[in-house]
Amino acid sequence: MTKINAAGTAIVYSTYLGGLRTDEAFGIAVDTAGNTYVTGRTFSQDFPTVNAFRTWPGDNDFNAFVTKINAAGNALVYSTYLGGLRTDEAFGIAVNTAGNAYVTGRTFSQDFPTVNASQTWPGDNDFNYSTYLGGLRTDEGYGIAVDAADNAYVTGRTFIGVFPTVNPLQTWPGDNDFNAFVTKFNPSGTPVYSTYLGGLRSDCGCGIAVDTAGSAYVTGFTFSQDFPTANAFKTWPGDNDFNAFVTKINAAGSALAYSTYLGGLRTDEGYSIAVDAAGNAYVTGRTFLDTFPTVNPVMPWPGDNDFNAFVTKFNASGSPIYSTYLGGLRTDEGFGIAADANGNAYVTGRTFLGVFPTVNPLQTWPGDNDFNAFVTKITDTTSPTPTPTPTPSDTVTLTSAIPQTGSIPAPDPGFGLLSGLQYTIQVPSGATQLSVNLSGNQDVDLFVRFGQRITVSGGAVVADFKSESLTGNESITITPSSSPALQPGTYFIAVANYGPGAASFTLTATVTGGQPTTNPIDNPGFFVRQHYLDFLNRVPDQAGLDFWTAQITSCGTDAGCIEVRRVNVSAAYFLSNEFQQTGYLVERLYKAAYGSANCQRHIDYWRRTSAPGANRQV
């Protein structure tokens, strides 16, 4: 466990907690005096105990534990096992203003210790209450919260329709799968309400928070297309995968204040949620690929083919204030989140390899090839993405080389969106003309837009210049006298196909005018784009280009910082799955060794042996 000061510049304390076998902490809470409460599971018979309610039960299995550490981090106030003679695991913990700890999890023990006492904490290390919560099938508690009146709120998942309900907002949906549940206990441990939350497929409640009015906020993930929604920011996105959800239940448990999906077209899972005094909800979890909904993002999709953490903040009515990716080019997952009185979000989770974005880091990447924990503080005020400095040149061509030829499949009618490819070109100061030429078959549309990404609205591309219904060759020439006028900066060239069939094309682009004043490779934007070409064999997606360029430009004029960041960027591309596992690594090695990249049979072999289930031998 680690405590970091408010500025994030120093560790107040950092300590191991465990014995000679596996010990894992899953939940943490802090009281008003700064004492820390931790829960999880232990396989150790010698787990450290102090003033223990329960010593080692004598089994050879996991047991839950609950530990309270003083504010200085140098002593255990109490530390106890919590379990019976079978597996017991605690996943969530909360603490009230009196210093009472509330724990939830799962047990396989028939002798799990239960206490039905209604008294308040008398100063000893005994239970106020301890109870089973479930039916005749699997039931697991993953999140717990407590309000100012000492009511406890629990969420998790339950299997089949035998979970105990009290004044339910929703009864069992009738499926044969897991469903999320939400249960509220009064201070004596009697349920106020206990309800299902889900649809006809698998649903899981992972995190829960409660506001000053007693409204419960729940996040998790659902496979259901009919998950209950109300005043939703996002409805079912149309995929066949897990989606995160965020649900606010009123204090009586009788109505949904709002309930929304939160995800794109691939896997999205919400793991933790927090709420501030204004009723703003903060959610973190993980998302796969580039379709997660972003609003005022701190950072865009990094451009990888892996999981990324996400952080989303909703206002009291369920509208997003911001929604952002958080991660690098490898696996990143957000597991816990907290919020302070100023609206700052604090996120923790895990990241793989040394490509996680750091700002004012207390510790840099340790240099290992494994997962590392991360801690990130996010404010409401997001900084704009730095614009890469244009690369001056007499003649600038598309970064993907000229001519660029390719094919675009027919649009997918299931989503009603166009199919297309996108390229970028830099226009230096003093440029007099940008010429773009496209040749191809029918139903290929050319678009050029200055200064921002091509945007899609209602199935149509919004652009400054466009040529539609191509019948042969189409050219667009832009000059300083055009409307809108040619300006220095980044232009985006999108080749889009509305169908109904596939399209092929050849694209050329040339900039004339402007004088080179620097070595192009010294320009951060050019440097990053060249890595896309050299390592990934493709032009950059704009989100990835902006993100990795910002890693360098954030150094300002600090030459030492710039040099380190350039090395880190190069390492990120070398370590990326897209380079390591597509065969391009083999091609580049072949070219370096033999002076030629004509090694298709070697690349084909690599791809075959890299396929899932293949035995790779190199």
Image (cartoon, rainbow, N blue to C red):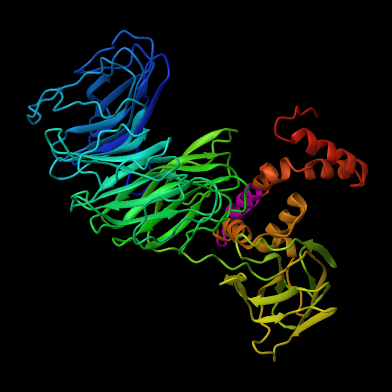
Q: Main secondary structure of the magenta part?
A: helix
The quadrant of the rendering that contains the N terminus is top left
Q: Is residue 219 left or right of residue 551?
A: left
Residue at horizontal 65 percent and vertical 52 percent from the top: 566
Residue at horizontal 39 percent and vertical 62 percent from the top: 320
Q: Residue placed farthest to the bottom in the image?
A: 481
Q: Give whichever of 460, 568 is nearer the camera.
A: 460
User: Can you say whether 11 is above or below 89 in the image?
Assistant: below
Q: Give whichever of 137, 323 is nearer the camera.
A: 137
Q: Residue placed farthest to the top in the image?
A: 58
Q: Is residue 292 left or right of residue 520?
A: left
The quadrant of the rendering that contains the C terminus is top right
Q: Position of residue 559 (x, y in %)?
A: 60, 56
The residue segment tinted magenta is: 556-569
User: Can you say whether 122 is above or below 506 in the image?
Assistant: above
Q: Is residue 331 left or right of residue 255?
A: right
User: Can you say whether 329 is above or below 420 in the image?
Assistant: above
Q: Position of residue 136 (x, y in %)?
A: 32, 25
- Mark count: 0
Q: Position of residue 527 (x, y in %)?
A: 70, 58
Decide if residue 8 is in sight here.
yes
Q: Give whichever of 516, 452 is nearer the camera.
A: 452
Quadrant of residue 515 in the image? bottom right
Whether residue 464 appears in magenta in the rendering, the answer is no
Q: Is residue 371 left or right of residue 196?
A: right
Q: Position of residue 29 (x, y in %)?
A: 27, 37
Decide if residue 401 is in sight here.
no
